[in-house]
Image (cartoon, helix red, strand yellow):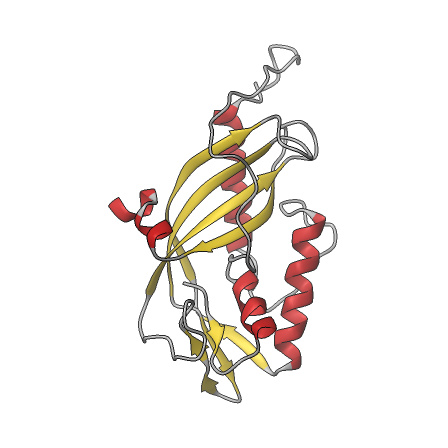
Amino acid sequence: MRPTLTRSTPAMACAAAVLSLAACGGDADGEKTSATSPESSAASSEPTYDDDYAYAEAKKAEEKYRAHDLNQPLAEDTEWATPSYIKAYNDQLAALKEQGVTQKGTVKVDSMHEETSNPDAVGGWNLTMYQCSTSTVRLYKGGKDVTARPAEPTKPAPKGPQRSVHLLSYATPDDGKTWQLDKAQLLLGEDTRDSPCQSN
């Protein structure tokens, strides 16, 4: 679930969104077609940087994100996130802190599903994956729960664990050897129903 502030400005709602792995508007990059990655020219002792390898490394990046304290900024040299993601995360965490808002709770990833691999994407090879999760994360200000519904920011979010679906985008700085979290988009409505998470 994406925790947002009730009666908040769009900017504050957006801040809460990024910190729980949801993008602030726009579709995820990458086309909806699958492609096979180029074969590695490395020696046989080196791994083949194909789709299977890439998706496995992307999952490792997500696991490192989950180990991070939601109320702490990301270091500028965080290896598992792109510079643009680090900046967006830190800027919006600072915006929440200015409002006196903290996050409490955890996110359990129930499953991840491969979506696209696009070696020819503008800016370099990228991957997208669906993430199905269950969240107990809530936003608090002055001891009061101010968490809002993702699709209706003026209404309080229901109590209890919330299931959500995100479309995650990953980029590689070294032609497929390592992968970094680059963007995330919270899916709602029909997009959620059409996702692999619906069958979980």
Measuring 40% from the left and 72% from the top, which residue is drawn there? 149
Measuring 47% from the left and 47% from the top, which residue is drawn there? 167
Measuring 53% from the left and 38% from the top, which residue is drawn there? 58
- Residue 39 lies, in percent from the top left, at 59, 14
- Residue 83 lies, in percent from the top left, at 71, 49
Q: How many marks?
A: 0
Return the residue nearer the eye: 58 or 192. Answer: 192
| Residue 102 visible, this angle | yes
Q: Quadrant of the N terminus?
A: bottom left
In this image, 151 relative to 118: left or right? Answer: left
In this image, 195 relative to 184: left or right? Answer: left
- Residue 25 location, quadrant: bottom right
User: Compared with residue 24, is residue 145 higher up or lower down, i.e. above or below?
Assistant: below
- Residue 46 location, quadrant: top right
User: Compared with residue 7, is residue 82 higher up or lower down, i.e. above or below?
Assistant: above
Measuring 47% from the left and 27% from the top, which residue is drawn there? 34
- Seen as rendered, the residue at the extreme top is 44
- Residue 139 lies, in percent from the top left, at 48, 76
User: Compared with residue 175, is residue 151 higher up or lower down, i.e. above or below?
Assistant: below
